[in-house]
Amino acid sequence: MTETEQLQPMSVADWDAAYRRGTLPWDEAPSAELLQVLQRWQPAPATVIDLGCGSGTVARALAMLGYTVLGIDQSTVAIELAVQRTPEAACTFVVADILGQQPLPDADLMIDRGVLHTRCSVESRAEFVAALARHCRPGRLWLHLGALASEQAGSTSFARGPSALTPTDFAALVEPYFTIEHCQQLPYGNTLGETDFQARLAVLRRRGGPNSN
């Protein structure tokens, strides 16, 4: 695969096709570690926006813990699946993209489980973080889970797989807008050979609030 091919991002049509096929190795229940970190930093009841919610797996898990969850995804097929699989009133799902012009409601926390690492260039990652910051009031939280690269290996960019960031590159990306309150290393998921790569679980706070630096 050439560098040009690597950096052709998945389109909305590509995501729709993946959800129609049911080839969703990333569609796993959130880990106990993620839920523990969430509950420690933002206990329920609280409002959460699940970015790139897919079929609603994470949103449903959070709703069962007492959170009020809005799931957004740019894939219409994913949102249709989420609505079909979710008991009435447990969560709300809408077709939306954080990079778009559609306004989003205020929330205590935004969760990005594997969304940032689908951005396959420095520019697109910066665009995503800036958009997230626009929708996140000062003092509010962002919970991030994404692929982690070692400093020795360096950051990587792939369109058809997770783009991993080193700690240094991640900090440089987020710190203009957010302070990193918590960070730990853990496997992204538990599907052998698919989602068991090393990941970063981070809690970030929007700068400008009473608890920010």
Image (cartoon, rainbow, N blue to C red):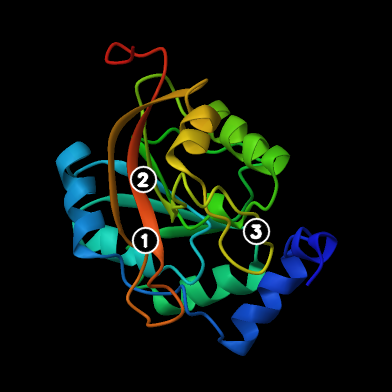
Mark 3 to mark 2 CA distance (whole Å): 17 Å
Q: Is residue 59 left or right of 42 when viewed as pictured?
A: right
Q: Which mark is residue 59?
A: 1
Residue 192: x %, y % from top left:
38, 83
Q: Which of the image's four quarters has the C terminus?
A: top left
Q: At numbered mark 2, what does the secondary structure look like: helix, strand or loop?
A: strand
Residue 84, relative to residue 56: is it above or below?
below
Residue 158: x %, y % from top left:
66, 61
Q: Amino acid at mark 1?
A: Ala
Q: Is residue 164 left or right of 103 when viewed as pictured?
A: left
Residue at the image point whose x is 47% and y is 52% from the top: 149
Would you call the spot at circle 1 few (<14 residues within 10 Å), some (14-19), or many (20 or more)?
many
**Label 3 or label 2, whichever comes before in sequence order:** 2
Query: In terms of depth relative to the viewer, which is nearer, 64 or 151?
Result: 151
Mark 2 to mark 1 CA distance (whole Å): 9 Å
Residue under circle 2? 48
Residue under circle 3? 74
Mark 3 to mark 1 CA distance (whole Å): 16 Å
Residue at the image point whose x is 43% and y is 39% from the top: 167
**Label 3 or label 1, whichever comes before in sequence order:** 1
Note whether residue 135 is visible. Answer: no
* Number of marks: 3
Residue 129, relative to residue 189: is it above or below?
above
Residue 104: x %, y % from top left:
54, 38
Q: Amino acid at mark 2?
A: Val
Q: Report the residue that reaches farthest toward the bottom.
A: 21
Residue 81, relative to residue 59: is it above or below?
below
Q: Which of the image's four quarters has the N terminus?
A: bottom right
Q: Amino acid at mark 3?
A: Gln
Residue at the image point whose x is 64% and y is 49% from the top: 97
